[in-house]
Amino acid sequence: MDIVQLEIDDHIGTITLNHKEKLNALSTELVEGVISALNECRRNKARVVVLRAKPGVRVWSAGHDVWELPVDGRDPLGWDDPLRSLIREIEIFPAPVIAMIEGSVWGGACETIFACDLIIASPSTTFAVTPSRLGVPYNVSGVLTFFNAAPYRLVKEMTFTAKPVSAQRAEQVGMINYVVDNPEIEEFTYEMARGITHNAPLSISVMKDQLRILAGAHPMTPQGFERIQGLRRLVYDSNDYKEGILAFKEKRKPVFTGT
Ligand code: YXS
């Protein structure tokens, strides 16, 4: 069974995450499947893509595959990391990507959803941004995705506490577009998707790209970037980062010492 499934029908691409055993963790294999599906949608000139998991999942995605996070002194979220590639491919895809969410969303999967253009979630959905739970130093463009998705103070709350935020609260603050109950969520999502396919695709594509460029237009000096990279290295070289990953693998609570 493919861990990523693709259907293209009447200008609408549907990409379904289907790696139940690993709770749709964003492994290299799964990310490559999603990127390949996006490329197929591009070849078929899809005018909108729906990114979803199987109906009724408890966990939409458990985030980055923790077993693929390096503990050998390499940046865990470097440019060619699968999660980084996935975010970029969603952002540059020349048509709207609608995230249709059921179940809980964790870590890098939250960023993946926030990189999408529209977000429709079921009432049971929660979003948990978890770098601080694992000791991971998130990367700059990733933090910018969160910064563009939610109010400043809520981004701080989510990143500092790593606690799940409900779909209702996310909708209240404009972090997602709609909360729609099952089973209506599918019809609601595809009605929106069909509506988009009836509008001018070139106009939508250029507005999506303009919004991406404007949202990313935050001045940062080379010195400022280098200072952040230096701080991030201190974190991914730290005992706490190794402890966070090991505790996850040993299924126990981490004990962070700040070293
Ligand atoms: O023990 P087995 O072999 O059955 O495997 C277990 C888990 O190890 C595995 N699994 C994962 N494997 C790799 N990467 C993951 N992110 C991941 N999450 C889970 O799936 C099997 C079932 O997990 P289990 O027994 O815990 O299921 P559960 O139903 O009790 O709990 C579901 C979750 C999602 C609440 C729980 O699995 C969980 O808390 N997972 C970790 C969520 C998380 O912290 N994700 C962030 C990953 S790191 C990331 O995205 C960024 C780098 S960052 O951290 O910076 O945001």
Image (tube, helix red, strand yellow):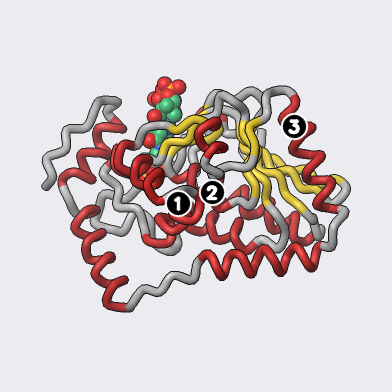
As displayed, is residue 8 above or below residue 103?
below
Helix, strand, or loop for circle 2? Answer: helix
Left or right: residue 64 versus residue 235 is right
Instruction: Assign a secondary structure to mark 3.
Output: helix
Front in this rendered view, residue 217 or 46 = 217
**Tag nearer the camera, 1 or 3:** 1
Disc 1 to disc 3, C-alpha distance: 26 Å
Q: Residue furthest bottom?
A: 222
The dot on residue 114 is 2
Q: Which residue bears the numbered disc 1? A: 146
Q: Are marks 2 and 1 in contact (CB under 8 Å)?
A: yes
Kindly identify which residue carries mark 3. Answer: 186
* Count of labels in the image: 3
Q: Is residue 177 above or below residue 47?
A: above
Residue at figure coordinates x 62%, y 28% from the top left: 122
- Dot 2 or dot 3: first in sequence order is 2
**Residue 256 place in picture, x, y as percent:** 16, 38
Q: Residue at x 54, y 48 (%)?
A: 114
Report the image quarter containing ligand 1.
top left
